[in-house]
């Protein structure tokens, strides 16, 4: 894997790197991606192929600052990461997932390496998790290491991502004040489902495009095919014949879940793309006009990955759940690029 010869604005180590969405935004901005670290071996090919970097399958709890420094992590150093969001997600209301402790490991590595800049992306619910204690402790570590900190919740369509996704962004620098670049899109001019996926070839439920194996849709049961045929764009299961409505939706606890088994709108941003976006019953993931759920490629495009982004080697079997997990867990690359631009501008203003 070749490295860039032109001067780079910085050198990035990406913790919890997954398939490389965050790194790819930095790569587009000319940063040198030194390494990606993730426990999921399935992400190796996607990360390395698209970011011209090395992937290390490691548990973050076993990674040391000394090891990070040993992999030729030159300056300026940027430590980036998106710790698993499942513990803080609204989809995990009981919050019993111990993975929240991985944020403490992230803080430990900051203390051990003192990179010039740190950036973190996560779900907004992290701000309130355990009454704000977890995020507060993370910030306290940064402050004790003399970092200037900026953080806020951003709306992804404002940064060119065609989905209604809110994310918590943190930027921290030991060189001086730092902040996120201003949004580039406004309401009425947000990217839409149409702008992202309309040009793709038609495929059927259970079908796959001959030219792009990632443009592959899950098969629908006979019942779900009847349901999607009666589903309206932006509608809900209330549009169906009574015989097709699940009993769980008619109970009081299910009446508020109007987006499950829903179709997307063509001229609006998509809903948040989750790891289960390829399943019709998992949210408003029905194609706006075709009788199927989103394909893997459509999910990737709605996450703002470019259409050529490779998630599997040529000829390799595409596993829906595996690739869907990689896509849904990723930081949207356009949001990542805005983060990288923010850090680039900052480092230019505070040269060594």
Image (cartoon, rainbow, N blue to C red):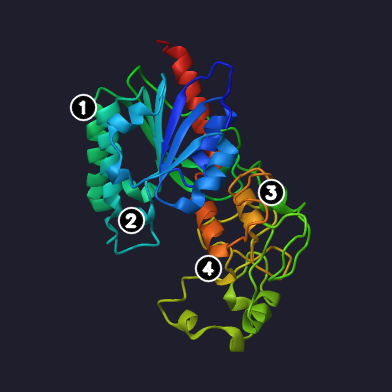
Q: Earlier in the sequence, mark 1 or mark 3?
A: 1
- The CA distance from mark 1 to mark 4 is 43 Å
Check disc 4 and report the residue beneath it: 282
Q: Who's the residue at 46% across and 71% down the image?
A: 256
Q: Within the image, what quadrant is residue 77 found in? A: top left
**Residue 317 appears in which quarter of the rendering?**
bottom right
| Residue at the extreme bottom | 243
Q: Which residue is mark 2?
A: 87
- Dot 4 or dot 3: first in sequence order is 3
Image location (x, y in percent) of residue 188:
65, 43
Q: Can you identify the residue that label 1 sits on?
A: 144
Kindly state the secondary structure of the residue where label 1 is placed: helix
Disc 2 from disc 3: Cα separation: 30 Å
Circle 3 residue: 196
Q: Tell me the crowding category of disc 3: few under 14, some 14 to 19, or many 20 or more residues within 10 angstroms, Cα based.
A: many
The answer to whether marks 4 and 3 mark residues whose Cβ atoms lie closer than 8 Å is no
Q: Are marks 2 and 3 in contact (CB under 8 Å)?
A: no
Q: Is residue 67 left or right of residue 179?
A: left
Rendered view: 324 above or below 122:
below
The answer to whether the residue labelled 1 contacts the one labelled 4, judged by CB atoms less than 8 Å apart, is: no
Query: On the rendered structure, is 319 left or right of 350?
Result: right
């Amino acid at each position: 894997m070749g490295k860039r010869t032109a001067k780079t604005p910085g050198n990035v180590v990406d913790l919890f790197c997954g398939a490389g969405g965050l790194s790819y935004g930095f790569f587009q901005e000319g940063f040198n991606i030194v390494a990606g670290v993730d426990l999921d071996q399935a992400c190796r090919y996607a990360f390395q192929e698209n970011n011209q970097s090395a992937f290390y399958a490691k548990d973050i709890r076993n990674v040391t600052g000394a090891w990070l420094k040993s992999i030729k992590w030159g300056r300026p150093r940027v430590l980036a990461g998106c710790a698993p969001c499942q513990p803080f997600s609204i989809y995990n209301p009981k919050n019993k997932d111990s993975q929240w402790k991985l944020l403490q490991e992230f803080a430990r590595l900051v203390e051990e390496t003192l990179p010039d800049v740190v950036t973190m992306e996560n779900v907004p619910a992290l701000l309130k998790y355990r009454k704000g204690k977890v995020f507060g402790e993370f910030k306290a570590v940064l402050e004790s290491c003399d970092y200037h900190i900026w953080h806020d919740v951003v709306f992804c369509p404002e940064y060119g991502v065609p989905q209604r996704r809110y994310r918590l962004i943190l930027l921290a620098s030991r060189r001086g004040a730092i902040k996120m670049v201003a949004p580039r899109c406004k309401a009425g001019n947000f990217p839409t489902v149409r702008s992202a996926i309309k040009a793709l070839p038609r495929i059927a439920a259970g079908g796959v495009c001959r030219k792009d194996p990632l443009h592959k849709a899950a098969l629908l049961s006979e019942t779900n095919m009847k349901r999607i045929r009666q589903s309206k764009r932006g509608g809900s299961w209330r549009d169906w014949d009574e015989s097709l409505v699940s009993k769980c939706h008619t109970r009081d606890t299910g009446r508020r879940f109007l987006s499950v088994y829903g179709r997307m709108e063509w001229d609006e941003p998509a809903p948040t793309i989750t790891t289960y976006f390829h399943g019709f019953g998992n949210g408003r993931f029905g194609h706006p006009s075709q009788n199927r759920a989103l394909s893997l490629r459509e999910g990737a495009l709605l996450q703002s990955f470019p259409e050529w982004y490779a998630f599997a080697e040529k000829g390799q079997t595409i596993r829906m759940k595996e690739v869907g997990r990689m896509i849904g867990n990723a930081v949207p690359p356009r949001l990542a690029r805005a983060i990288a631009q923010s850090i680039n501008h900052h480092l230019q203003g505070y040269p060594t």
